[in-house]
Amino acid sequence: MDKNTVSHDGTSLAYESAGRGSAVVLVSGAMSTGATVAPLAAPLSERFRVVVYDRRGRGGSTDTAPYAVEREVEDLAALIGAVGGEASLYGISSGGALALRAAASGLPVRHVAVYETPYAMSEEELAARAQYTKNLTRALAEGRRGDAVELFLRLTGLGEAMIQGARQSPMWAGMESIAPSLAYDDAVMGDGSVPRELLSSIRVPVLSIAGDASPAWMREAARAIAESVPQGAYRTLEGQTHMVEPDVLAPVLAEFFAR
């Protein structure tokens, strides 16, 4: 990241931009930095000024205690101000929940697109989320970053053998370094249910996308978002999972953001 802007509470946010035209800010999800969504910037930058940033507490950005979801909305306000005062937002996974909250707060946002924001669609899923929040809070309070990462990986459905393999990989140290930010994404997701009242207050077009090869509940959650927003639309991408291919997603986003 070659640029910085400062949020309302003094947090320094590292970002970079590419391309020209109206601004599009890409919002990453849990256990990720701006580099995770950077591959999407290249195809989109042919038509837009695409902004990639490290959310607070990750990568080149700093952090300021105490955390609150409102601070991350202020971060987006600072970024939008730095790139012209208006932008569209794209958020993947829990980053989608942040993008939706930002739009609902009244930031100068033109459009919001989200990909597989993982809201729970059953009582069993909500109970699992509540237990995850409890266990994650305890692990981070006790400084057990590796255990916190394991909890998140289990929540995503990763098998035990793969989790133990990840622990032995060169990537593990980097995952542990941003483990505290798991609490931030957990807070952004609220209790895990679809925040229908909040979504109903969004006054800009929202495109909610899912991969048709993802679990059914992911598609159900994406549809629920679209149905809860006054100007909501739902779309699936053929053959895609949660690890969506940038070259498949980019044309869909470009068409939407150009409206």
Image: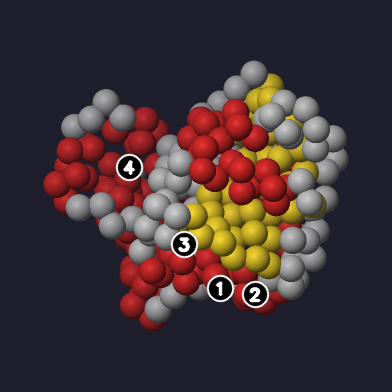
Q: What's the residue type where badge 3 is placed? A: Pro
Which kind of residue does numbered mark 2 sit on? Ser
State the mark number for residue 145.
4
For residue 224, the mark is 1
Q: Residue at x 52, y 31 (%)?
A: 39
Does residue 235 appear to the left or right of 169 in the view shown?
A: right
Q: Position of residue 218 (x, y in %)?
A: 43, 64
Among numbered discs 4 and 2, the one appearing first in the sequence: 4
Q: Check contact, mark 2 vs mark 1: CB within 8 A.
A: yes
Query: How many angstroms separate mark 1 from mark 3 (CA)?
Result: 11 Å
| Relative vertical location of residue 46 with respect to residue 121 in this rendering, above or below | above
Label 4 element class? helix
**Horizontal and vertical percent position of residue 17:** 69, 27
User: In the picture shown, does residue 59 fall above or below 9?
Assistant: above
Mark 1: secondary structure = helix
Residue assigned mark 2: 228
Which residue in the protein does label 3 denote?
Answer: 118
Foreground mark, 4 or 2, reads 2
Residue 70 appears in view = no
Disc 3, disc 2: CB below 8 Å? no
Q: Inspect the image, locate mark 4, and give the three-letter code of the amino acid beneath it.
A: Arg
